[in-house]
Image (cartoon, rainbow, N blue to C red):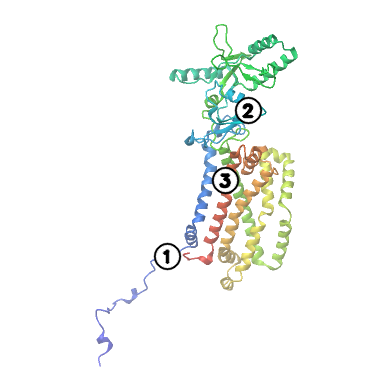
Amino acid sequence: METLQNKRDPKLFQEIPDRTHLHDAAFETKPVSFLEDSFKRFAKNKASIVAAIIILLIALFAIIVPFASPKSYVNTTKYPNGFRDDKFAYALPYNPLFKGTGFWDGTKVMAYNENSYKALQCNDSNHERFVELDHVSETKVASKINKQYYVRIDTYAVGNFTVTLSQSEYAKLVEHDEKSLAANKDYKTIIKPMVDVASYLEEYRATMQADGENESTILDVLDKMKTHYNQNQDVYYKLSAKQSDGKYNSNSFTAVFDANGKVIPIYAKDANGDYVYVEEHAGAYTVRVDYYDYLTYTLGFEPRYFFGANDSGQDIFLRLAEGARFSLILGVCISAINFVIGLVWGAISGYYGGRVDMIMERVTDIIANIPSIIVLTICSIQFTNNLALKSSIGDAGVIILGFLVAFVYSGWVGVAGTTRMQFYRFKGQEYVLASRTLGAKDSRLIFKHILPNAIGTLVTSSVLMIPGVIFSESSLSYLGIIDFSSSGINSIGVLLNEGQHAGLQNNPHVLLFPCLIISLLMISFNLFGNGLRDAFNTSLKGSED
């Protein structure tokens, strides 16, 4: 009988002369780390990815805009709290891409009576406030028909105003106008002729005396007319207080038109009949200027507002970026502090249990049952009255410190409770008991075996704490419980409070954009937190779903 040795096929078998090199082939793949696996699961959650992108864009907006906006670099002596000008109060949002469309172009439709409509079209400034007539409505009162003119106006065409300059400032402005006019014949000068109100009032006094008016009526009309001219420096023409019935009304003034239907200017003239452009007194030069162009000249940029302006003429776009930056930094800092305190407290309480847990839980219950608003009020009063602290960190620092202490005081209790529950859940697992049996130390059991399994829930809690802090700050600022605005701090809550006073019907942009930002932050942080929870869930490790 042939042996198996003789029957083997030499093509299938081959002797290895040196058996010392015989071993298994190494794996070509390496095990996936926990973080890499978590990132893969997070990347599959499209809603969380979109939310993360939105949060990133808002963060970039909050960081870049305050540094890139020219309004951040204005004269701090003239504008100590940033650029503002109440002449542009409630100016509407302006985007050059939509210029002339009636949408987002700084224009709005307003109603005027017939006299106001005529006055609106009388203008000697460089920018026309009247854009177009939208429509006219008529209402019949008794036998009289009243017309209401609905006109689209440019909210940035604020008209002419008088400014007081030093001699050098006036000389530079004149030089700027002369150079610009020499370079461009169509250039409209910033400096406008002065209006001789005093001479016209004397002329109008004579007119009223000729009509037989008594002195008290004359004085009343002239006084009210002078006030009207001073408050409306765009009015450069003759006014009349005479009504259609021949009587004089000191509360109603209409423009006087010539035979061609044009207003009659009352510009000041010198002895040679030339227009007067400046009045000098004690080294101060009073000049009548087109205010929009004058600001553009002095600031170096056009006073336009991408998101519009508030009641003080501040740029909402810039203030919203500063407010979002403050709210995000405050939210992240408070959440990080609460996370660390809560993690340490909850880990000790949950891991050791027994009497340690009981004592720590009673302390937590006491802290949690004291309302944060009471703590906030106490901190605010205490820190505000501490003159040494106030002088060292300032008014803003005192308010921020009070807010920080109040929210850290009990803010970590939720994280501590979540951490404690997770430790109770995992500390009795077999792998933990096996590690303890093999002599693992408490620190290794906590940080190597228990905490990684609980990290998903804890990360979600900490991330969701950020919008909670932002929302709390916004709510307290909105309600006026915390007054950040008094110390010059911009926050989303301060902007919401301003929007409330501005009114949604008349100035919706003041409230719209802060609401949009805080809504995006709330929704995005919640979706982002849910994505992180699933990504760090160790029970899903290696899962493709």
Residue that label 1 marks = 30
Whether residue 77 can be seen here: no
In the image, is residue 104 above or below residue 374? above
* Residue at 70 percent of width and 10 percent of height: 209
Residue that label 3 marks = 517
Crowding near pointer 3: few (<14 within 10 Å), some, many (20+)?
some
Label number found at residue 20? none
User: Real-space Cα distance between discs 1 and 3?
Assistant: 44 Å
Label number found at residue 146? 2
Say left or right for 407 vs 180: right
Eye-nearest disc, 3 or 2: 2
In this view, the residue in front, 402 or 300, is 300
What's the residue type where badge 2 is placed?
A: Asn
Quarter occupied by residue 369: bottom right
Q: Locate residue 32, reporting x and y percent.
A: 45, 64
Quarter occupied by residue 82: top right
* Sequence-earlier tag: 3 or 2: 2
Eye-nearest disc, 1 or 2: 2
What's the residue type where badge 1 is placed?
A: Lys
Crowding near pointer 1: few (<14 within 10 Å), some, many (20+)?
few
In the image, is residue 275 above or below residue 95? above
In this view, the residue in front, 183 or 392, is 183
* Sequence-earlier tag: 1 or 3: 1
User: Real-space Cα distance between discs 1 and 2?
Assistant: 86 Å
Residue found farthest to the bottom:
1
Say left or right for 527 vs 472: left
Crowding near pointer 2: few (<14 within 10 Å), some, many (20+)?
few
Q: Which quarter of the figure is the N terminus placed in?
A: bottom left
Say what secondary structure mark 3 lies in: helix
User: Real-space Cα distance between discs 3 and 2?
Assistant: 44 Å
* Residue at 67 percent of width and 20 percent of height: 227
